[in-house]
Image (tube, helix red, strand yellow):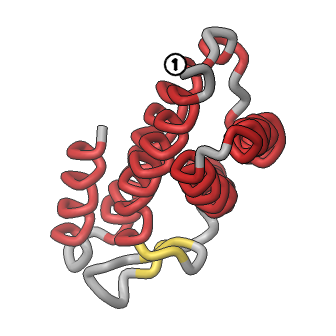
Amino acid sequence: MQSVAHHLQVEAVKLVPASTVDADSYARSAFNRYYYATFLCVRSALVSIDRKYESSLNHKGVPDLLRGVIQKRIKAIQKKADKLGDQLLVKDCRQANSRNLKFANTLEKAYAIRVVADYTPETAVDFRSSRFSLSGVAVTEAHDWLGEATLWASLLLDVIRQENA
């Protein structure tokens, strides 16, 4: 999915001088694919934690899920680790906690941009540079969403694996 998004990004830039309408469509599709690559990473991590997320994830609600249920679980693991004197796990929990909150904000922004890309064609894609933007979000930022999701998932799953170790 990420490679498709990147291909759409490159093609959008190539199309700009000849056809801004087509370039706009490719650019919007790139933002959409970057979001979905990110969402699929998040979904995979959450499903590995609890299979109920296979069918119950609401795109708009995932950032709140991270800030709520997931954050509470990380804090509970941290509290247990602190009681047991496992300072390494406490440190890992703090890192996962911080990354989880930051990533929830990133995912919320990514979803909002995906909605703009898909449902508000009157919001113009800004092609003033080869790193075009939509609603003030550069495509390079969208490109980085999956990397942030991968780091978030790695930290979270590492802590979850240690929960009952």
- Say if 156 sits above or below 47 in the image: below
Q: Residue at x 54, y 40 (%)?
A: 156
Q: Which quarter of the rendering shows the N terminus?
A: top left
Q: Residue at x 30, y 49 (%)?
A: 5
Q: Residue at x 44, y 76 (%)?
A: 138
Residue 143 on image: x %, y %: 35, 61
| Residue marked by disc 1 | 48
- Asked whether 37 or 13 is in front, the reply is 37
Q: How many marks?
A: 1
Residue type, mark 1 in image? Ser
- Tell me the element at label 1: helix
Q: Is residue 55 left or right of residue 128?
A: right
Q: Residue at x 50, y 49 (%)?
A: 152
Residue 118 on image: x %, y %: 57, 48
Q: Is residue 1 left or right of residue 96?
A: left
- Asked whether 42 or 101 is in front, the reply is 101
Q: Is residue 14 left or right of residue 96?
A: left
Extreme residue in the front direction: 85
- Asked whether 101 or 139 is in front, the reply is 101
